[in-house]
Image (cartoon, rainbow, N blue to C red):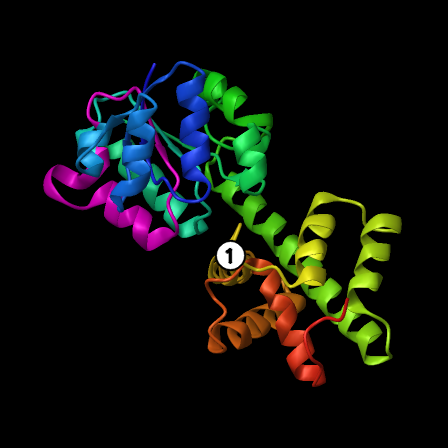
Amino acid sequence: MNIGFLGLGTMGAPMARNLLKAGFALRVWNRSRGPVDALAADGATPGATPADAARGADVLIAMLADDDTSRTVLCEGAGGGALGALPRGAIVVNMATVSLEFAREMLAQCESLGLRYVAAPVLGRVNVAEAGNLNILAAGETAVIDTVQPIFDVLGQRTWRFGDSPEQANVVKLAANFMIASAIESMSEAAALAQGHGVAGADFLDMITTAVFATPAYTGYGAAIAKEVFEPAGFKLVLGAKDVRLALLAGEAANVPMPFGTVLRDNHLDSLAHGEGQLDWAALSRVALRRAGLPKAKS
């Protein structure tokens, strides 16, 4: 199975490397050249353009930042971008977190070109991607997902299937990221409350993530908040802000009120206004401290 892989960022690079280790033929492209050269040294074939990486692929995987980047890389440029370079019958697997509107747009575009489309965003940070233990949230035609399941088996510990419409996987990912943002926010406010009364925020977070919320979202982000370690970013705050905004749009489209979502949106905007967008998502904790007039967490 020949695979084209677009987007070798924080998550994409280890995912592509795992596919190489599993013996898949891989042709890769990234906007910056460094990750391409690193994977080429491991046996991948570099693509000069997105279309070059897609040409002749049985499966094209996209792991790009957002709707606009995905649209530019996949659909624009000479010959219709990467999609235009694929042979009819090829499968497009979009593993990025995108809007429901874009998912529908991609499905229509692929169908018009005789391509098959699957949405398969992932849950897990960089270390999880490196270990091949991602949770993959998939939606699309059953037979198409079955075809790419060997790829998912390399990248993740489990594939969760959520329906025949690709956008269903995307709404699940947005809902999950909404809950992660909520966890970060609740830990941030609770730690600030404890700190406001003379208790070290780090001590509170150590207790709560051990005794009550001993799950990856809490333990991982809780440790980052407690230690104020926000670089290098495992997942950038600006991307978290994007996902909260997309979750609110998805809620509006289905008449689902999300009142806490508006709080999260505004707190992300506060953080972005303070120049924290390129830090790890856990840096959202600084908002609660600023509003309380507190210094960084005490250890």
Quarter of the image for the N terminus: give it.
top left
Q: Quadrant of residue 224?
A: bottom right
Decide whether residue 127 is among the magenta residues.
Answer: no
The amino acid on which the numbered mark 1 sits, given as a three-letter code, is Asp
Q: Residue furthest left?
A: 78
Spot occupied by residue 90 in the image (x, y as percentages of width and height) = 29, 22
Q: Nearer the viewer, residue 168 or 290?
A: 290
Spot occupied by residue 22 in the image (x, y as percentages of width and height) = 45, 16
> Measured along the vertical axis of the image, is residue 120 above or below residue 283?
above
The residue depicted at 53 percent of the width and 32 percent of the height is: 130
Q: Nearer the viewer, residue 175 or 192?
A: 192
Q: Nearer the viewer, residue 77 or 278?
A: 278
Q: Quadrant of residue 195?
A: bottom right
Spot occupied by residue 144 in the image (x, y as percentages of width and height) = 43, 21
Q: Quadrant of residue 78?
A: top left
Q: Is residue 110 left or right of residue 270?
A: left
